[in-house]
Amino acid sequence: MAYEPIKPRREDGHGSSAENPTHISGTIEVDVPPDDYALGEVLPDQPGAGGVLTFTFSSPVVSFWVAVVGTTGVCKVDHYGGTPSASSGIPVEAGGVLPIPEPATVVKIYAPAGTTVTVWGQRRA
């Protein structure tokens, strides 16, 4: 049994249908805002050693990301000004990336040995 595709059809005779397509011509103006997250900063990687790493941006960022390179271990992030530890903070597993949509200048991360942590942030233009 063969099936035929369903063709759109308008019973009222207005608009487009497969048998009576409507063609639009003219110019459409679109206001595209500038990319206001055009600026950013990537901080140097730091190896984990079972303690707290401190990453400092040259000026505040509006959001930042934390990436953990390694095969084992869980890093912990505290972006509220506290000090993370092995048992306190937002977890980022090895191989993971955590976006933090919060402003920051200093980011503290607990990182176990065997991991490498990368942090980058964005600023509004």
Image (cartoon, grey):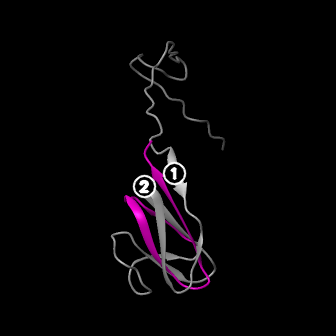
Determine the residue located farthest toward the right in the rendered image: 2
Mark 2 or mark 1: which comes first in sequence?
A: 1
The residue at which mark 1 appears reads as 40
Label 2 is placed on what type of residue? Val
Q: Residue visible at 57% across and 77% down?
A: 94
Q: Quadrant of the N terminus?
A: top right
Most frequent secondary structure within the magenta stretch:
strand
Q: Quadrant of residue 48?
A: bottom right
Report if residue 119 lies within the magenta region. Answer: yes
- Magenta region: 96-125
Determine the residue located farthest toward the front in the rendered image: 58
As measured in the structure, the alpha-carbon distance from the residue carrying label 2 to the one carrying label 1 is: 8 Å
- Estimate how packed mark 1 is, as few (under 14), some (14 to 19) or many (20 or more) residues with alpha carbons within 10 Å: some
Name the secondary structure under disc 1: strand
Q: Is residue 86 above or below residue 61?
A: below
Q: Quadrant of the C terminus?
A: top left
| Label 2 with label 1: CB-CB less than 8 Å | yes
Q: Is residue 109 above or below residue 5?
A: below
Label 1 is placed on what type of residue? Gly
x then y, percent, for residue 11: 41, 22
- Estimate how packed mark 2 is, as few (under 14), some (14 to 19) or many (20 or more) residues with alpha carbons within 10 Å: many
x then y, percent, for residue 99: 46, 62
Q: Compare residues 64 and 10 and report the one nearer the observer.
A: 64
The mark found on residue 61 in the picture is 2
Q: Is residue 45 above or below residue 49?
A: above
